[in-house]
Image (cartoon, rainbow, N blue to C red):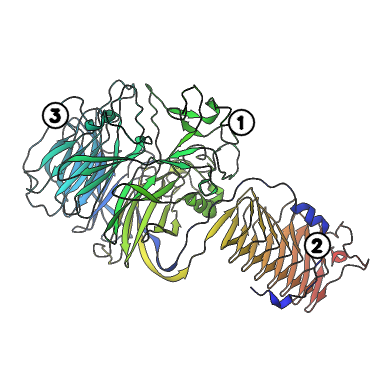
Amino acid sequence: MKRNKFADAKYRLNSLLLTACMAPLLAVCTAPMLARAGDSIELTPLGTFATGVFDDGAAEIVDYDPGTERLFVVNGADATIDVLDISDPSDPTLLFQIDVTITAADAKANSVAVRGGMVAAADDDDDDDDDDGDDDRGGLVAAAVENVDPQLPGAVILFDTDGNFLKRLVVGDLSTGTKSALPDMVAFSPNGEWLLVANEGEPSDDYLTDPEGSVSIVDLRNGVSNATVVDVDFRAFNDASLDPSIRVFGPNATVAQDLEPEYIAISDDSLTAWVTLQENNAVAVIDIATATVSALSGLGFKDHGSHENSFDASDVDGLINPTPWPTRGMYQPDTIASYEVDGQTFLITANEGDARDYVGFSEEASVAGLMLDPTEFPNAAALQQDTNLGALTVTSTIGDTDNDGDFDEIFSFGARSFSIWSTGPVHQVFDSGDDLQQITVTHLHEEFNSTNDANDSFDNRSDDKGSEPEGLTVGEVAGRTYAFIGLERIGGIVVYDVSDPYDPTFVQYINTRDFSGVAAHGTAGDLAPEGLAFIPASDSPIGQPILAVAYEVSGSTTIFAIDEVAAERRSRRTLCNTTMTGRFDDVVAVPGGTCVLSSATVNGNVTAVNRSDLFILGGEVDGNIEGNPGSSVVVLSSFVDGNIRCTDAAAPNGCQVSGAIVDGNVRSTNAEGGFVNIFSNHIDGDVEVSGSAVQAFVSLNTIEGDLECRGNIPAPDLPNPNPDGLPPTNDVDGDKEYQCDASLGF
């Protein structure tokens, strides 16, 4: 920052500008996105296979077999596993489909996992088919297939990679009492000796039948034909004292019935599994060798009342309005993955959130529909307006802490984030706060919180769970570990470097959705990422790491190249919608909001996006200041080591620069909604006012470059700010060009 160059400059502030800057300011500032310097990666789409089936689960979970260079993709619409040839990832082609309906009870696959060269599918039928298969344990694939009666036990089915049936094993057929049901996810242990199945055990729609949740462990140590199954239940916890953040709330349900296993991660040594219990806000720890549950870990709740955890809660205000609200988020992760750092295992969760909403029982409510405790919520009437917190979907099952019939706390679904947890015991070491919200606002603010089955759906998911991080995977590239996180609603993949689990850093956000297309017509690109598979360079058909992603709503599967990129410094980007003081890297004024940087230092660029008001008062900016169309920019008594540019500046403040030292150019184009006022500055570059404006006033500036006025710009209707009564003048070292009506102001 060049402060000393003009240290003796005298500045006079326009009183009208000061009055404008003192207007009341609203809303919040969100926490900065994380960043790092160093070698990194970049995703680039290579090719896509599209089923052409819209919103019917035609591409859900995906895994890869390196021996055949094939992807195996769950196609719920056809009750198959689609087998894609990706020997040329730029042109994935369908080779054949594996029919998973081996018996009449088999419905459709829910998940697939591949190990080497053979396939195992998890299916719901309780008939055991003991046909012998290949004893070679060189590789298997597992897929979860639900029964035509989803409250009956399922099965795991083994195939080879050419789709030939090998064996079928029932899972969840508990020896006594209530059965388990709905195998929803399968995973191989790293050593290939075990195959684990998460049996979710969802209730019937009338809630009269509620199967138990369980985890089935398939022992493959003696080969496929001799494989055996042990079902791990949760009955030992029926009378146990549980962590208070573990939710057990189904009508008349035991703990064993209420817990619903969702997703599985397995340790590198194949000894331990961690299973998300999504609806219950918990993780189960499984000892694989003894087939027992060693612990149930509650995940606690997220404080959304802090600025770093702010979120937009309304879908009816038509604004991007991240705000700290007096709510607590239930993490409720869907996908979980594990990785090691210095011999310690860490878990990563995608905190999607999920509610029970059945005909026989529903926990969903809106904040507007709750009776809030008047002591805890003295501003309840304002909070419960739909433009504030009223429209937010929350649970009605917890929050009345003193049992007096009203709600003392508000609990919402999901955390709109991803988290990292240490193990032994499970303990959170990092949460991404509101990073995912910031990232999508920055990259796609016009599509903020869109839903996944229709375009032109701005703000649609704000009252639910936001972007809904659902799927994730991890992979190592050039000695660093990365997390790839799919955002189910707005779409796209967020990449973080998680090599330091205590301080992950944002790398990239890429979205292959086409917001100009029609989703139902198949012209909107990839919609709703569900399953992700990381393929290391050693297994890749092109000798470099790639990522395969299955998109549930669009029924498409897209392959991304993962390229190493040169070291660079990635800026910390801060979203601003309030008054901020301090040091920042890049700053973005939230669309529709007001950002005031008061005596702040910005070591990067400051951008006012559409419909935002930006004020920089007595600060330093070591970069450019950019006002996008529809925004207004006011810079007072500040040092700017870059350019200031206003495009289509809007009322009430237009484009105003006063009392500043600018080591660059100042340009205003088409300020149709507001006036242009460039007054008493030292500008080391050019000044240009062009296009149109309500009025323009450029006076008492020292300009080392050119001064130019072009377009339909009327003379100003402002008091003469020169205290000596002299006409407005500028000291211009370069050329002057007046081709407008604003000469009086120059």
- Location of residue 559 in the rendering, given as x and y in whole percent from the top left corner: 34, 56
- Location of residue 321 in the rendering, given as x and y in whole percent from the top left corner: 59, 44
Q: CA distance from mark 1 to mark 2?
A: 42 Å
Q: Which residue is mark 1?
A: 378
User: In the image, is residue 587 above or below residue 258?
Assistant: below
Disc 1 vs disc 2: which is toward the camera? 1
- Location of residue 574 in the rendering, given as x and y in whole percent from the top left corner: 56, 57
Q: Which residue is mark 3?
A: 175
User: In the image, is residue 566 above or below residue 397?
Assistant: below
Q: Which residue is at a point 54% across and 51% down the rendered structure image? A: 441
Q: Which residue is at a point 69% across and 47% down the rendered structure image? A: 25
Q: Which residue is mark 2?
A: 13
- Location of residue 554 in the rendering, given as x and y in whole percent from the top left corner: 39, 45
Task: Residue type at mark 3: give it.
Answer: Ser
In which quadrant of the rendered image does the N terminus lie? bottom right
**Mark 2, residues whose alpha carbon is within 10 Å: few (<14), some, or many (≥20)?**
some
Sequence order check: which comes first, mark 2 or mark 3?
A: 2
